[in-house]
Image (cartoon, rainbow, N blue to C red):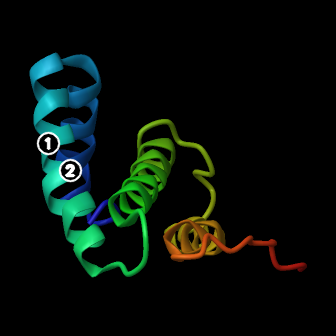
Amino acid sequence: MWEDPRTGPPLRSLALAALQDDAQRLAMRGYLERELVVALADRLIGPHRERRARAAAYVVAGTVLSHYILGLNADSRPATVVEDLLGPLTAALHPQGRAWAPERR
């Protein structure tokens, strides 16, 4: 959606508005809590499901904002940015909190 020329610009505008306006920020935070954190926590197993779901949501939201708003890793393809998150994110979601070591390339 962020890459699509029809939906990307409105999403970026919404994200920027949320960074500048308290009401927009609260609305976006509420949406993320309801639609992302709660939905993900309901699908996880093991202890601290909501806490792990919130950690995953923060990683994803931070990555999206960093990539699409701040332009960090702007030269990277979106798939590469996401792939770089999968290991640490999987570890955060794992019920035993197993350690993650990056793959050697």
Rendering quarter of residue 89:
bottom right
Q: Residue at x 43, y 69 (%)?
A: 47
Task: Using the image, determine if residue 62 lies above or below residue 96.
Answer: above
Dots 1 and 2: beta carbons under 8 Å? yes
* Residue 73 in view (yes/no): yes
Q: Which residue is mark 1?
A: 30
Q: Secondary structure at mark 2?
A: helix
Q: Position of residue 25 (x, y in %)?
A: 19, 29
Q: Secondary structure at mark 1?
A: helix
Q: Nearer the viewer, residue 31 or 50?
A: 50
| Amino acid at the residue labelled 1 | Gly
Q: Position of residue 97 (x, y in %)?
A: 61, 70
Task: Using the image, determine if residue 1 lies above or below residue 28.
Answer: below
| Within-10-Å neighbours for mark 2: few <14, some 14–19, many 20+ | some
Q: Which residue is mark 2?
A: 33
Q: Position of residue 58 (x, y in %)?
A: 42, 49
Q: Residue at x 21, y 39 (%)?
A: 29
Q: With 10 as the anchor, is 96 left or right in this view?
A: right
Task: Using the image, determine if residue 15 lies above or below residue 40.
Answer: above
Rendering quarter of residue 39:
bottom left
| Amino acid at the residue labelled 2 | Glu
Q: With 104 as the anchor, is 72 left or right in this view?
A: left
